[in-house]
Image: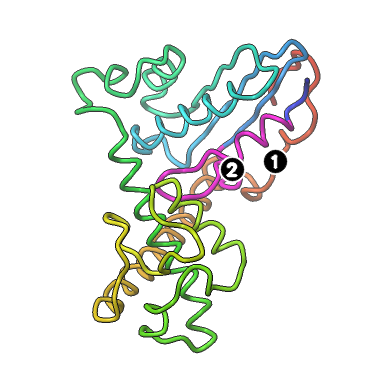
Amino acid sequence: MSGATPLLAALDTVRDPELDEPITALGFVAACALSSDGDAEVRLRLPTYFCAPNFAYLMVADAYDAVTALPGVRSARVVLEDHFAADAINGGVAAQTGFARSFAGEAAGELDDLRRDFLRKAVLAGTGQVCRALRASGADDATLASLTLGDVPPGPALDRLRQRRTELGLPAGDEAPLLVDPVTGQGVGPDAAALHLRRARLTAVSIEANGSICRDMLRHRYDTSGPHEQAQRQQVPGEEELR
């Protein structure tokens, strides 16, 4: 097994926790290579030097887990570049010490609660995205509150919402209500639908706006022509130096 393509397929599953988008689509993967012996190396970059270290740690750690889970990978090195906390993050992920020990004296604990909070926001945003299309076809708040996931026309937005709800342990089958409280998993009734849908809409717009800002900042910082300019998608034989 050689070349960068398997690595990129694995990295497609790693998301920016705040933006809920793959790090590959965002342009955060600067380069990657996989040798014929199974030694993987991935280099990540972020829009600014001061991106929150807890967000950065999650992405580096998730990238490491995704790469090491690949069949045929015997070792992995995931390196965050050009970040003020890169040494602590890279060292902690390589040693598998966790966030709290990597930032001893600074971190209050691990990042499980933070990950759940972002998943809840992703569920809200996903609800907003699905309901945006339904509203365009004439559905009002009362109608949306009466729908189940099985009532929604299939599509990428619905698939994504189902996946996020599943990750959070929320009902995601056809019989599940379209509108659910992302904390309790309980359905949202008609009386609370307007407020819930407003929150969902604002969360979706906020995440989409932040994603656009991050892309622009990354493009400006590294003088790239766009987030999908992925030179590393070419095959990288042997121990060829990362571009």
Q: Residue furthest front?
A: 175
Q: Quadrant of residue 198?
A: bottom left
What is the crowding at mark 1: few (fewer than 14 residues within 10 Å), some, or many (at least 20)?
A: some
- Going from the N terminus, do you reach mark 2 or mark 1 first? 2
Q: Is residue 239 left or right of residue 70?
A: right
3D distance between C-alphas at marks 2 and 1: 8 Å
Give the residue drawn at x 36%, y 85%. 142
Q: Is 16 inside the magenta-drawn segment? A: yes
> Which quadrant of the rendered structure holds the N terminus?
top right
> Residue 218, position in %: x, y?
52, 45
Residue 153 percent coordinates (x, y): 59, 73
Q: Is residue 149 above or below residue 98?
A: below
For residue 57, which quarter of the picture? top left
Mark 1 secondary-structure assignment: loop
Q: Which mark is residue 230?
A: 1
> What's the magenta region?
5-28
Q: Within 10 angstroms of label 2, few (less than 14), some, or many (20 or more) residues?
A: many
* Count of picture labels: 2
Residue ID for mark 2: 27
Q: Is residue 110 left or right of residue 42?
A: left
Q: Nearer the viewer, residue 196 or 25?
A: 196
Q: Which three-letter amino acid code belongs to the residue tagged 1?
A: Gln
Where in the figure is residue 138, as x and y percent of width and height?
Answer: 50, 89
125 left or right of 242 in image: left
**Element on which disc 2 rests:** loop
Whether residues under marks 2 and 1 lie with C-beta atoms below 8 angstroms apart, the answer is yes
Residue type, mark 2 in image: Gly
